[in-house]
Image (cartoon, grey):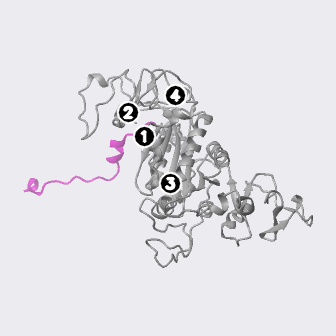
Amino acid sequence: MTDHDPNASDRPAPLLPPGATEPRRAGSLPPGFASGTRTPAPMPGPAAARPHVRPAKLAGLPEGPSGPATLPPGAKVPGAMPPGAMPPGGDGGGAAPASDRKAWATDQDVRWCPGCGDYAILSAVQKLMPELGMARENTVFVSGIGCSSRFPYYMNTYGFHSIHGRAPTVATGLKTMRPELDVWVITGDGDALSIGGNHFIHLLRRNVDVQVILFNNQIYGLTKGQYSPTSEPGKVTKSTPYGSLDHPFNPLAVALGADGTFVARGMDRDPKHLAYVLRRAHAHRGTSLVEVYQNCNIFNDHAFEAFTEKATKPFTTVFLEHGKPLVFENGRKGLRLDGLRLNVVDLATGDASADDCLVYDETDREMAHLAIRLFDAPDHLPRPFGIFYAEERPAYDALLNEQRVDVTARRGVGDLRALLHAGETWTIEDASDEA
């Protein structure tokens, strides 16, 4: 995504990289559209051919070498596009955000195994996007490596299929330099918690304003069934033929331990609840982590069956609601705080009531720790889903841009060449010159 140069037509045409297609000429429609009607399209051309949409100028801010400073620090900009700009896959005819789910879907064949839980998550996101009021040209999906990381191909927005475990770094750079964009990170249990673990925790610690959807299927699916950092002990896989000896990560405990400001869990088989959680994640200012229990029906089928199936779900799950008591099993049981532990109480017998149950407070970090640790609880305790923790804390990208604006106002626009030649420098001379 590069700046549009109105004088580009006066310059010699740049050489295209091998395999790249000719950039679109000004006034032509994006690939896949003709006269406003969607038709099958080839893969998009090089990034240089895509329109760059500048955010609105901020009054009173210093000008940089490329023009006035842009962007309200840390703001997601839903709004109209500048005249003449076209979103990816759009026809240039409207300035309002796309209000139809189909507008957010590409014409690419969705290539996951039949029955994969990824389909349900993709559907939930595509249905949700029109409700958020964001424009497609201001939306970016960044992924790492894994089955889930094909996600950007299926969203009719900008996207970046990056390298293994590094989606948080790409997203951090993008959000800090283009804070007006709505940035989503798509990752999996292996991508985020193994090779990408270091990047993952620092994204959470910094509190960059992005949404992270972590597809957790407790297996490496793309590489055909090895155990992952979230696989249970004793898991027999191709890489652990006698059973895994590793203690698994609890993804939400990792997030809360890294001082994450929004920590939540959903499941692929409950799209209504998942949509609610994702909507809340998007509204949060800062890094929002949503772990999604996602079934891999090829290499780890039925991993979450106890929590997702109608016959067992009421007995094995508790849905966290801020300001409401923790009850489950259709109101017949609840969770009461005994000291520093949560215990099950029977509400059907009359020995206890909902008033005796813990009223959940999603702003209480210690309460969130209690709920998250039900992951490790005995079988008679339910697994929680919903918003575990939400905290208001300044987002890194907003702080960075506020600092940039402040320093520029006080010291003026910097000169990189002058900086590189400042202080102590040395000149290396040819020895033959001395002779």
- The reply to whether residue 75 is visible in this rendering is no
What is the distance, in whole Å, between disc 1 and disc 4 at their CAs? 36 Å
**For the residue marked with disc 3, what is the amino acid?**
Thr
Which element is circle 4 on? loop
Label pair 2/3, CB-CB below 8 angstroms: no
**Residue 32, image x and y in percent?**
40, 30
Mark closest to the chain's N terminus, 4 or 2:
2
Q: Which dot marks residue 41?
A: 2
Mark closest to the chain's N terminus, 1 or 4:
4
Mark closest to the chain's N terminus, 2 or 3:
2
106 magenta-colored: no
Q: Which residue lies most toward the right here?
A: 350
Q: Which residue is drawn at 69% across and 70% down?
A: 377
Which element is circle 3 on? strand
Q: Which residue does the numbered mark 3 point to in the structure image?
A: 187
Q: Which of 415 and 169 is in front in this view?
A: 169
What is the distance, in whole Å, between disc 4 and disc 2 at their CAs? 35 Å
Mark closest to the chain's N terminus, 3 or 1:
1
**For the residue marked with disc 1, what is the amino acid?**
Gln
**Residue 335, image x and y in percent?**
80, 64
Residue numbers of the magenta segment = 412-435
Q: Which residue does the numbered mark 4 point to in the structure image?
A: 57
**For the residue marked with disc 4, what is the amino acid?**
Lys
Label pair 3/4, CB-CB below 8 angstroms: no
Which element is circle 2 on? loop
Q: Which residue does the numbered mark 1 point to in the structure image?
A: 108
